Amino acid sequence: MTDDVVVPTLPTRKPIRLIAETGRPVKGAQTAGFVLPDTDTLLGLYRQMVLARRFDAQVTALTRQGRLATYPSALGQEACEIAAVAALAPHDWLFPTYRDTIALLTRGVSPVEILAFFRGDWHTGFDPRAHHISPQSTPLATQALHAVGLATAAKLKHDPVVALTFLGDGSTSEGDAHEAFNFASVWQAPTVFVIQNNQYAISVPFSKQSHARTLADRAIGYGMPGYFVDGNDVAAMYAVITAAVERARSGGGPTMIEGLTYRMEAHTNSDDPTRYREKGEVAEWLSRDPVDRLEKYLTASGVLTSEVRESITKGAEVLAAATRDAMNEPPVLDPLELFDHVYSAERPALLEQRAFLAHELAQTESAAGAEAAGRESAESEMAGRA
Amino acid sequence: MTLVEETPTKIAGETDASGRASGTGPSAATPAGTPAAPGASAVASATAPTSVSIAGALNAALRDALAEDPNVVVFGEDVGPLGGVFRITDALNAEFGESRVWDSPLAESGIVGTAIGMAMYGLRPVVEMQFDAFSYPAFEQITSHLAKMRNRTKGRVTLPIVIRIPYAGGIGGVEHHSDSSEAYWTHTPGLTVVTPSNPADAYSMLREAIASDDPVIFLEPKSRYWAKDAVTLPVQTAPMTRAVCLREGSDVTLLAYGSTVKTALHAAELGAAEGLSIEVIDLRSLSPFDDETVGASVRKTSRAAIIHEAAQFGGYGAEVAARVTERQFFHLAAPVLRITGFDIPFPAPKLEEHYLPTAERVLAALDTWEW
C-alpha cells in the first residue's frame, strides 16, 4: 500500500477502478490512490484468468455430460478469484467456498484432486496442508471463522501468515459472517475478507439480501478498513487485496473488500436462471467482462502480442485436455475406506460396521462371480448343443 | 429433590480402585491421547490425598495441560480474569497470560469456528460454552465442521479441540441453564462425548480429552461441580472411553453418567436396605459406548436400567436400551428401563425437583418389573 492511500471511513461510493471497461487506465478519484500494477504482473494475471476460464468452461461441459455430480461455475468472476490468489504468499492460507474452484486451480491443486469433490469421489480430494487451502466450504460463511482462527493462531505463534477467505453476497446475511468480521477485528487477526458480490444467491437478487449502500460499508462498524471495488477489474482487485494482505502481515489487522461482479452462469447445472433474471442484464454484464477488459489494456500497451496470446490459448487447451483426460480415468474407490477417517482412534462399533460392509461386499462379489460362471457354463452348454 | 451427599472418601476409594481395575481393556486399545504418567515433579509433589472438587480438578487439569503443552489455549466467554461463571478457569489468565487464556467476544459459533481454524494451524484449543443451551448457536460449526473435518480430508486435517459444556440441571437455573444436550452430540459421527462424575475422573478425563487428536465434547455436570473427594492430583483413572463399575451388585445394572451417577449410587444404598443388590456403572463415555463393560455387567445381573436427566423420547437412554437389548437379549430377564426426565422442556427452578430422576423414582421404576 502506498503511503498516500488513506484508510477510508466509508468505502467510496463508486467502486475503486484502475482499468476502465474500455481498457483504458483510470485516473483520479476512482483509483482511491491505488496504483496500477506493472504490465508483467497484469500479463501474469491475464494468463491465469484465461486458463481459469477455460478450465471452468471445461468443467461445466463435463458436468452437463453427466461426468460430474455438480459444478458451481465462477464464469465472470475471474478477476476476484485470480487477484486474491495472486496477492497471497505460498505460506498464506486460502479459505474458499464451493464456487472458488478456479482459485484452487490457480494455487496449484491438480484438476483431478479438485474434481474428486464435484465428481463425488470424496468430500475433499486434495491435501489442505500441502496447499494451504482449506476444504471448499459448502455451509455459508462458516469458513470465514476458520480463517480468523487460523490467522489468530499464526499471530500467536509470531508467524507472518495471512488468511484470506472468500464470501458471497448471500453469505454475508449469515450470522457467521458477522461473527467472523467481529472476531477478526477484536483480535486484530491477519485476515482478508474478499466478498464477491455476484449479485445472486442462487435466485435471490442482492436487493433482497441487503439494504445497505454497499456490503463493504459494514467494515466501519467493525472498526476495520473496507473497500468497494470493481470486481471485474483485476488490476483494482489485485492492488486492493495486495495492500490488505500487506497490512495484515505487518500487524495492521483485517480488511473487508467487496468486489462487485456478476455470476454469468447458473448457480449450478441444476439451476434455471431464466426464471429469475433478464437476458438483457446478462448481456450488459457480458460487456463488462473482466478478461476482455484486461485483454484490451494489455493489447493496447503492446505486451499482449498475437504470439503471446496464442501461447496462452495453447496452454489453456492443454489444461482442458488434461482435465478431460483426468475425468476419463474412473476413480478407484474403496467402500471400506468410509470407516477409516472418522476418528483417529479405533472404535469397536465402527469396526463391527466395517466388517458388516466387508461381508456384504464379499457376498455381492461372490454372487456376481457365481452368476457370471453360471452364464458362462450355460453358454458353453448351448454352444455344445449347437 | 433430596440431595444426599455420599461419603466423599468412600466414593474416591471406589472410583480409584475400579478405575484402575477396569484397565481391563487391553492396553493396546488405550487411545494415543491417554495422558502420560505423572511426571517427576508430580511424583515429587504426590502426598496424602486432599479434598478436591470437580471444579477444582478441572481447573488443575487445565493448568497442567497449559503448562505442559504450549499449543494448548483456553478461550471463551468470561474465562479470562473472571475465571468463568463457574470459576473453572480461575487464575489461569493471570498465570498464563492473554495469549494462552483469554476472553472472546460473546458468540458461540465464533468461538468454535475460530477454534477450528486454530487447530488447523497446530493449536489445541479448549473452549467453553458457558451453559448447555448456549452451545446451540455453535451447532452448525460443531456438526458440519468440527465433527466432519477429519473424515472430509481423509485424516489430513485433525481437530484436537475440546468443547467444555456445563450441562444438566439441579442448580435452580433459569430457562436455558439446565439442558442435557448430549443426544445431539452423540448422534453426530466424528465426535467423542464424555462426562465425568467425580473429581478424579474430571482431572484425568479432561487431560486425556486435551491430549486427544479428535474433537471431544466434554460435558460437565454442573450440579456436581462442588462435590468433593479426597484425591491426589495429578491422577490417571481409566481411559476416558471406558465405562467403570462403581459399585458391584448382582440383581440389577444401573447405568448412569454425569449427575445421575450420584442418583444411582443413592438408589443402590436404598436398594441394599431393601435387600436389592444394585450394580452401578458410570458410563463416562457416551460416544463411544462401552458395550464390553456394560454387556459383562448385564450378563451377570440380567436386568438393566439407564438413568438420565434429558427427556426420554429419542434420548440417549433409547440408544442404550436398544444396544443392550440387541446384544444381551437372551441374558435379559426383563425389558431395559429408562428413568429419565419427562418429554417436556426443562422446568423452571421451583419445579425442577419434580422433573429430575431421584433415587426413589429409580427404585419405584425397578419395582415395575416382575421379579
Image: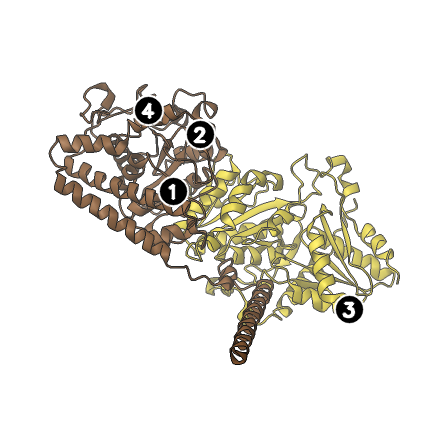
Chain colours: A brown, B yellow
Whether the residues at callouts 1 and 2 have beta carbons within 8 Å, the answer is no
Residue that carries the numbered disc 1 in the rendered image = A96
The residues tagged by marks 1 and 4 sit, at their Cα atoms, a distance apart of 28 Å
- In screen coordinates, is B236 left or right of A25? right
Q: Amino acid at mark 3?
A: Phe
Q: Secondary structure at mark 1?
A: loop
Q: Is residue A210 visible?
A: yes
Q: Chain of mark 3?
A: B
The residue depicted at 45 percent of the width and 26 percent of the height is A205
Q: Amino acid at mark 2?
A: Thr
Residue that carries the numbered disc 4 in the rendered image = A284
Task: Mark 1 or mark 2: name the one nearer the start of the chain.
Answer: 1
The residues tagged by marks 1 and 2 sit, at their Cα atoms, a distance apart of 27 Å
Whether the residues at callouts 2 and 3 have beta carbons within 8 Å, the answer is no
Q: Is disc 3 on the same chain as disc 2?
A: no
Residue that carries the numbered disc 3 in the rendered image = B330
Q: Position of residue B293 (x, y in %)?
A: 67, 66
Q: Specify few, some or many for label 1: CA neighbours under 10 Å numbering under 14, 14-19, or 20 or more.
A: many
Q: Chain of mark 2?
A: A
Location of residue A264 with respect to A119 vertically, above or below: above
Q: Position of residue B290 (x, y in %)?
A: 64, 63
Q: Amino acid at mark 1?
A: Pro
**Picture quadrant of residue A30:** top left
Mark 1 or 4, closer to the camera: 4
Q: Amino acid at mark 4?
A: Glu
